Image (cartoon, coloured by chain):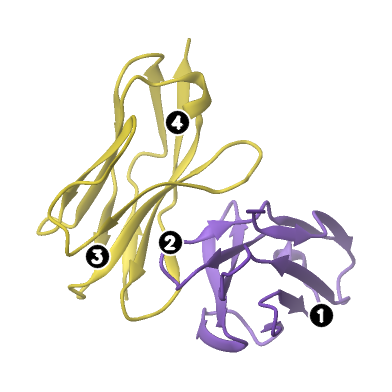
C-alpha cells in the first residue's frame, strides 16, 4: 500500500523569505501523480501544484515550485517570497495512475508566516 | 465556472440517526470523490464515483455509502451515526480523475 509522510508538523517563515516543506512517499508503482494542497482556516482545500511522475522536470507555479526526486521518493514544496496569505495547512498527496481518483494524503504541515 | 458545492455546510445529528450529504461537481466533471477529515486520522478516502459507478472504495464500514446521479451530482449517506463520525466531509470533482478540486466541506457533528 502507498503511504505519504510529512515529517514537519509545523513550520514558520518570515514574510518575503523562502521555505521548503518536505514530503516523502512509498510506492511500488512507477506511474503516479503527486500534489500539494493548501488548506487555509476556511478549510477549503486548494490545489497548489501537481507533478507527473513520468516528467523529470520539476513543476513550477508562480512562487511555488517542487523538488521531485523519484528515486528517493521525495517531493518537497518550495514557497518563495512568502506572503501572509500563504499561512495554512499544506498537504502532500499521492494518486496512482491506475487506481482512479483515490488521493492518499500526508498528515499535513502547518505553515505560519511572520510579518 | 462555478466551483464544487456541498450542502449542507453544517449539520448536527444524534447518535443512531442517519445523514445524507450532497455534492455538486464542477460542470463537465464526471468523477466525484469523498473524503473524511478528522484531527486524529487526517484525510481519508471514502469512495469515488465515475459516470454513476463506484470506481474506488476506501476502508470504511458499510454504514458509509454513496451514489452518483446522471448529472454527476453525488450524495453520501451515513447510517446509524456514531460519535466518531464527527468530521469534516470533503467532496472533490475531477474531469478525468486526475487533479481534484474540492468543495468547502460539510461539518458533521454527532452528539
Location of residue B97 in the rendering, given as x and y in whole percent from the top left corner: 45, 72
Tell me which residue sits at (32%, 44%) in the image: A7
Which chain comes out yellow in the rendered image?
Answer: A
**Distance Cα–Cα, label 1 vs label 3:** 35 Å
In the visual, does A102 lie left or right of B32? left
Q: Which residue is mark 1?
A: B80
- Disc 2 with disc 1 on a shared chain: yes
Instruction: Decide: few, some or many residues near mark 4? Use Cα within 10 Å; few <14, some 14-19, many ≥20.
Output: many
Q: Which residue is mark 3?
A: A26
Residue A111 tag number: 4
Q: Specify the subunit that label 1 lies on.
A: B
According to the image, label 2 marks what residue? B99
Do the residues marked 4 and 2 share a common chain? no
Residue A88 is left or right of residue B9, and the answer is left
Marks 3 & 4, CB-CB < 8 Å contact = no
The verdict on a common chain for dots 3 and 4 is: yes
Amino acid at each position: 500500500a502507498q503511504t505519504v509522510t510529512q515529517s514537519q508538523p509545523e513550520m514558520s517563515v518570515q514574510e518575503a523569505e523562502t521555505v521548503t516543506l518536505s514530503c516523502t512517499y512509498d510506492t511500488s508503482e512507477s506511474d503516479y501523480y503527486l500534489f500539494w494542497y493548501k488548506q487555509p482556516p476556511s478549510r477549503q482545500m486548494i490545489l497548489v501544484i501537481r507533478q507527473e511522475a513520468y516528467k523529470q522536470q520539476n513543476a513550477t507555479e508562480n512562487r511555488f515550485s517542487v523538488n521531485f526526486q523519484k528515486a528517493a521518493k521525495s517531493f518537497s514544496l518550495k514557497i518563495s517570497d512568502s506572503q501572509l496569505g500563504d499561512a495554512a495547512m499544506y498537504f502532500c498527496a499521492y494518486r496512482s495512475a491506475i487506481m482512479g481518483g483515490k488521493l492518499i494524503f500526508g498528515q499535513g504541515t502547518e505553515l505560519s508566516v511572520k510579518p | 465556472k462555478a466551483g464544487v458545492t456541498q450542502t449542507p455546510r453544517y449539520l448536527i445529528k444524534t447518535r443512531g440517526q442517519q445523514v445524507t450529504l450532497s455534492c455538486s461537481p464542477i460542470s463537465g466533471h464526471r468523477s466525484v470523490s469523498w473524503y473524511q477529515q478528522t484531527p486524529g486520522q487526517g484525510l481519508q478516502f471514502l469512495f469515488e464515483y465515475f459516470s454513476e459507478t463506484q470506481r474506488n472504495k476506501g476502508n470504511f464500514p458499510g454504514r458509509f455509502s454513496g451514489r452518483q446521479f446522471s448529472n454527476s451530482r453525488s450524495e453520501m449517506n451515513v447510517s446509524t451515526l456514531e460519535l466518531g463520525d464527527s468530521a469534516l466531509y470533503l467532496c472533490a470533482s475531477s474531469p478525468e480523475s486526475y487533479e481534484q478540486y474540492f468543495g468547502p466541506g460539510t461539518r458533521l457533528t454527532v452528539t
